[in-house]
Image (tube, grey):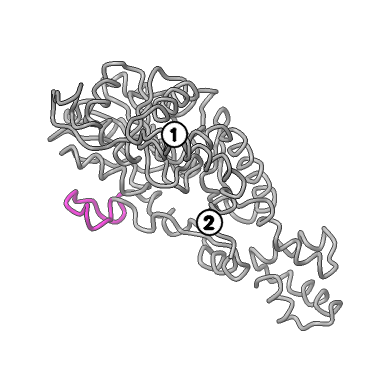
């Protein structure tokens, strides 16, 4: 089975560098907030294009500490999307605030920025957009609304490291940009980790205190904080991977183009709006035949996942918010239609082609088979029967070969 994320293959490519930097760290005996963390913070701030970046223990903590540092607290409301991972709302709730949901765009699945304004009340203090699956949210509109109503903006960039809008990196638009280094991310550690990018030095200093028990110096605590520090070992691993992030993101976009060329017109493929740079943390297709497509992928040895099968507003843990089915029809429809699978390497992507070429098929025939394999159009069965005959096998055996 082709895995969702092949970290073993990745380690085969970068293993020596990883071992070398881990050895350096172990010999230095610096494990918490050491020189590798500082180096990573500096390099990421330069890459994103902001004055400061602060390493924390996870992407969830990045959201939580950012909200806290920006003064979001008890009784406040934070506008966000119902179509995302639970941590987005969870971090809001940690502060005593209330998540207020806005439906998503049908094309990008990001928060529908033009619908935000209608949800603003006198309790609204912030907007928390998610750059879902690697495509940036509409930060121009969100920024305009935030400025009009004097709201803070916290970007959830967990799935979008390196994504950009009109050349400006996500994580540099708002008051804080929150990144996750969970192992499956485009820039992933070998454990948990997170980063916050900020433009305001006062906010930066506040987050630095909050991540370290509210401490400004040794045994000096100005506030009650948290224990949320990016450790030196994860920072070292991330430094190795950061050098390759542009190459890896570009590789994802190239593979996405291949998928879109093959699938366009048969299912709804991911949209990349003009002026946006999508880094394809997931390549997301939409089809009313979701389960059939997923079963076909499974039979063909390709892993796939339906993400967020229950939108946040319908989660049991958030029932106290009093949302109901039908409140966010676009997000709810996406739960039923979406089949999402991570980008796979070219070798894995072409595994089925290799198997068919071994049977003597030409490229044109293989292209037809790929389409038939994925979509199961009945009109192609007669062609499949002819090819099965030419191979001297039954139609059933032929369909099994192509994963039908």
Q: Residue furthest front?
A: 27
| Boundaries of the magenta span | 313-327
Tell me the quarter of the picture where residue 159 sits: top left
Percent position of residue 246, x then y: 59, 33
User: In which quadrant is the N terminus drawn?
Assistant: bottom right
Residue annotated with mark 2: 4
Closer-to-camera residue (252/47): 47
Q: Which mark is residue 137?
A: 1
Residue in the foreground of this view, choosing between 197 and 244: 244
Q: Residue at x 58, y 48 (%)?
A: 10
In the displayed structure, 110 sits above or below 330; it is above
The residues tagged by marks 2 and 1 sit, at their Cα atoms, a distance apart of: 25 Å
Horizontal placement of 129 versus 244: left or right?
A: left
Instruction: Give left or right: position of 319 versus 155.
Output: left
Badge nearest the viewer, 2 or 1: 2
Residue 47 - label? none
- Sequence-first tag of 2 and 1: 2
Residue found 21% across the figure and 31% down from its top:
68
Quadrant in which the C terminus appears: bottom right
């Amino acid at each position: 089975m082709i895995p969702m994320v092949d970290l073993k293959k990745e380690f085969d490519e970068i293993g020596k560098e990883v071992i070398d930097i881990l050895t350096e760290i172990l010999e230095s005996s610096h494990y918490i907030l050491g020189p590798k963390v500082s180096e990573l913070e500096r390099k990421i701030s330069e890459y994103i294009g902001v004055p400061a970046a602060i390493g924390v223990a996870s992407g969830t903590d990045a959201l939580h500490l950012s909200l806290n540092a920006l003064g979001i607290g008890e009784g406040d409301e934070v506008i966000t999307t119902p179509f995302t991972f639970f941590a987005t709302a969870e971090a809001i709730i940690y502060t005593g605030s209330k998540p207020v949901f806005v439906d998503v765009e049908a094309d990008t699945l990001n928060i529908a920025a033009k619908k935000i304004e209608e949800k603003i009340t006198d309790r609204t203090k912030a907007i928390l957009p998610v750059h879902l699956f690697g495509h940036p949210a509409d930060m121009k509109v969100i920024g305009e609304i935030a400025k009009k109503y004097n709201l803070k903006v916290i970007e959830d960039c967990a799935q979008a490291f390196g994504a950009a809008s009109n050349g400006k990196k996500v994580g540099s638009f708002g008051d804080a940009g929150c990144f996750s280094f969970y192992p499956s991310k485009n820039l992933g550690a070998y454990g948990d980790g997170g980063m916050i990018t900020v433009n305001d030095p006062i906010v930066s200093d506040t987050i630095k205190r909050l991540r370290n028990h509210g401490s400004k110096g040794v045994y000096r605590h100005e506030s009650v904080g948290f224990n949320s520090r990016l450790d030196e070992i994860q920072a070292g691993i991330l430094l190795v991977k950061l050098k390759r992030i542009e190459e890896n993101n570009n590789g994802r976009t190239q593979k996405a183009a291949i998928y879109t060329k093959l699938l366009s017109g048969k299912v709804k493929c991911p949209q990349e709006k003009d002026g946006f740079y999508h880094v394809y943390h997931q390549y997301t297709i939409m089809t009313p035949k979701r389960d059939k497509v997923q079963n076909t992928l499974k039979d063909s040895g390709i892993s796939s996942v339906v993400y967020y099968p229950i939108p946040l507003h319908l989660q049991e843990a958030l029932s106290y918010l009093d949302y109901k089915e039908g409140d966010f029809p676009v997000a709810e429809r996406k739960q039923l239609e979406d089949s999402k699978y991570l980008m796979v390497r070219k070798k894995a992507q072409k595994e089925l082609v290799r198997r068919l070429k071994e049977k003597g098929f030409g490229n044109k025939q293989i292209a037809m088979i790929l389409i038939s394999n994925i979509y199961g159009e009945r009109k192609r069965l007669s062609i499949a029967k002819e090819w099965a005959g030419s191979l001297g096998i039954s139609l059933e055996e032929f369909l099994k070969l192509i994963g039908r």
